[in-house]
Image (cartoon, rainbow, N blue to C red):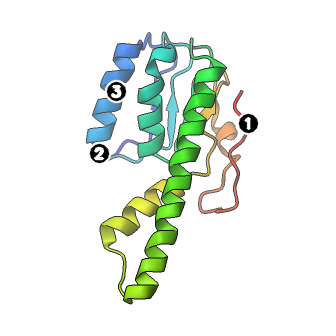
Amino acid sequence: DRISKLDLQGCSVSDAGLEVLTTTLMSRSCNMIELYLSRNDITDASEENIYKLLLRFPRMRLYTGNTRITESTKFAVEERLQEELKETMKAVEDMEFSADEESGDASEDEISMINRKTTRGAPLLSSSEDASSSEVSDYVEGDEAAEPSELH
């Protein structure tokens, strides 16, 4: 019923296919932890879809080895996600300040949005050609001090 891991290595997924997959995953109730897209026909044109997936599933590990996604695109996605995190942290600070002044609480929707955006700790993109479950163990769920590993 709920998808958490999806292995599409070597399945001839194209940019158009990734767009369909992104739309489908975004509209479903799933908790993606691992998405394997290695050895597919995905290019830099999929930058927006990769960004959307990583923003929607902040703990997801995305494997993109042996695709046509360049390091500069991976870096651009990483920068966008870091900027989103900074903006979210600023929003948290502003909410805390206004809550102190108004003696009010943040709404459940605001708290949910903040929790979703600030839980990123897993490495964003991995270029490992063939990912294995041992590669995912760099990140311990709930470890707030975990740092994303370098992109390869």
Residue at the image point whose x is 32% and y is 39% from the top: 26
**Mark in front: 2 vs 3:** 3
Residue bearing mark 1: 150
Residue bearing mark 2: 1
Mark 2 and mark 3 lie on one chain; the one further toward the N terminus is 2
Residue type at the position of mark 3 = Leu
Q: Quadrant of the N terminus?
A: top left
User: Dot 2, how many residues are within 10 Å of its Cα: few (below 14), some (14-19), or many (20+)?
Assistant: few
Residue type at the position of mark 1 = Glu
Using residue 30 as the reference point, say whether residue 115 is left or right of it: right
Residue at the image point whose x is 42% and y is 79% from the top: 98
Cβ–Cβ under 8 Å for marks 1 and 2: no
The image shows residue 88, relative to residue 32, as above or below, that is: below
Real-space CA distance between mark 1 and mark 2, rounded to the nearest whole angstrom? 33 Å
Residue bearing mark 3: 21
* Farthest left residue in view: 27
Pick the front one: 137 or 115: 115
Pick the front one: 79 or 5: 79
Residue at the image point whose x is 61% and y is 51% from the top: 121
Using residue 124 as the reference point, say whether residue 117 is left or right of it: left
Residue at the image point whose x is 48% and y is 39% from the top: 54
